[in-house]
Amino acid sequence: MQGGAEVFTDLSRFDAVYEEMTKLNELFKKVTKVSEQFSSMPSPFPLFHSSATKIKVEGNLDSGLLMNQIRKKFSAFHIPFLGGLRVEKFEKTSNGIILEGDGFEFLTEKILFATNAFASQKPLDLPVRPGRGLVKVSSPLSYPFPNGTFHLDRGYTYFRKVDGNRLLIGGFRNLDQKTEETLEVGQNEVISSAINMVTERNILGFLPNWDYSWNGWMGFTENESPIIQTIDDGIVVAAGMNGMGVSLGPFVALEALRLFR
Ligand SMILES: Cc1cc2nc3c(=O)[nH]c(=O)nc-3n(C[C@H](O)[C@H](O)[C@H](O)COP(=O)(O)OP(=O)(O)OC[C@H]3O[C@@H](n4cnc5c(N)ncnc54)[C@H](O)[C@@H]3O)c2cc1C
């Protein structure tokens, strides 16, 4: 695990974290047995405030590799993996559950809806509030970028290197939170400009070429806990990961599976 760091543009924010560090370390150790999870360090990026918060145990994953592994598992169990099919309706019948969408119909014995932010739409219409994220990836950089996962502004903005030596950066949803409560694909110009600005001013010192950008979605619930529930016999939903689905996913999946037993 490469660890990570929270970097700061504002000294008062660093001081506030520093004051609570001993307490935070105690709380973290109680749960994880990891000591000194948080400590202060010189910022790895000279254009941010000179002090940063080091985070000893923080990992990141390659979502492409994750999807490959999931497909391999499906294949090992001889389960077809069908993407791009939007379920619009489901109906429980005496023969099983019928799933229907544009031009297809399936009969299944059991179904787990794991549509996260999209659970707010048909066919579930659950109380999940969508949060759209914008992520950009630069062309390869010509100098070594530090290892690790970095974030600023309470974690709202995050960056790291990917695919060799490209900068990946996303976030700033908090600058226009209401507009970003949408499932539409799109680029919010306020957020896009903020990503450009912090990249140029604080991270790289110049504006790179962006080779890719995309939207991803988070799903928020009123009580900030995922919805894991049985809708009907053999029909379960696990949605509303509150922006923590990568870390919560394996535990949520186990809970959801228990509901089928
Ligand atoms: C920019 C960004 C940064 C994040 N950072 C972190 C982080 O640091 N740590 C962390 O733990 N989490 C993070 N998250 C959250 C995490 O990515 C999500 O919680 C996680 O991806 C949710 O996974 P999921 O499989 O439940 O849902 P999703 O990955 O959203 O998958 C839902 C799937 O359901 C499909 N679908 C939707 N409607 C239908 C339908 N009607 N019929 C059939 N299929 C449908 C969608 O096409 C999609 O493939 C981040 C999210 C974003 C956007």
Image (cartoon, rainbow, N blue to C red):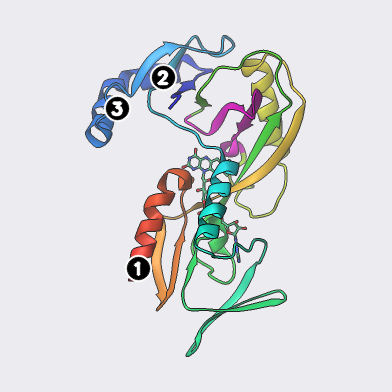
User: Which numbered circle lies on residue 230?
Assistant: none
Residue 224 in sight in this render: no
Where does label 2 land, which residue? 54
Q: Earlier in the sequence, mark 2 or mark 1?
A: 2
Q: Residue shown at 67%/13% (left/top)?
A: 143
Residue lying farthest to the bottom in this orientation: 94
Where does label 1 land, which residue? 259
Q: Is residue 219 above or below residue 63?
A: below
Q: Nearer the viewer, residue 247 or 116?
A: 247
Q: Amino acid at mark 2?
A: Lys
Whether residues under marks 2 and 3 lie with C-beta atoms below 8 angstroms apart, the answer is: no
Percent position of residue 225, x then y? 38, 53
**Cα distance, mark 2 to mark 1?**
39 Å
Asked if the stretch drawn in magenta spans residue 157, the answer is yes
Q: Amino acid at mark 3?
A: Leu
Q: Secondary structure at mark 3?
A: helix
Q: Quadrant of residue 235?
A: bottom left
Q: Residue shown at 39%/67% (left/top)?
A: 229
Q: Nearer the viewer, mark 2 or mark 3?
A: 2
Q: Quadrant of residue 78?
A: bottom right
Percent position of residue 240, x then y? 47, 55
Percent position of residue 189, x then y? 73, 37
Q: Tell whether circle 2 marks a residue whose Cβ is less than 8 angstroms from ligand 1.
A: no
Q: Earlier in the sequence, mark 1 or mark 3?
A: 3
Q: Amino acid at mark 1?
A: Leu
Q: Which residues are magenta?
A: 154-175
Where does label 3 land, which residue? 24
How crowded pointer 3 is (Cα within 10 Å; few <14, some 14-19, many 20+) is rated as: some
Q: Secondary structure at mark 2?
A: strand
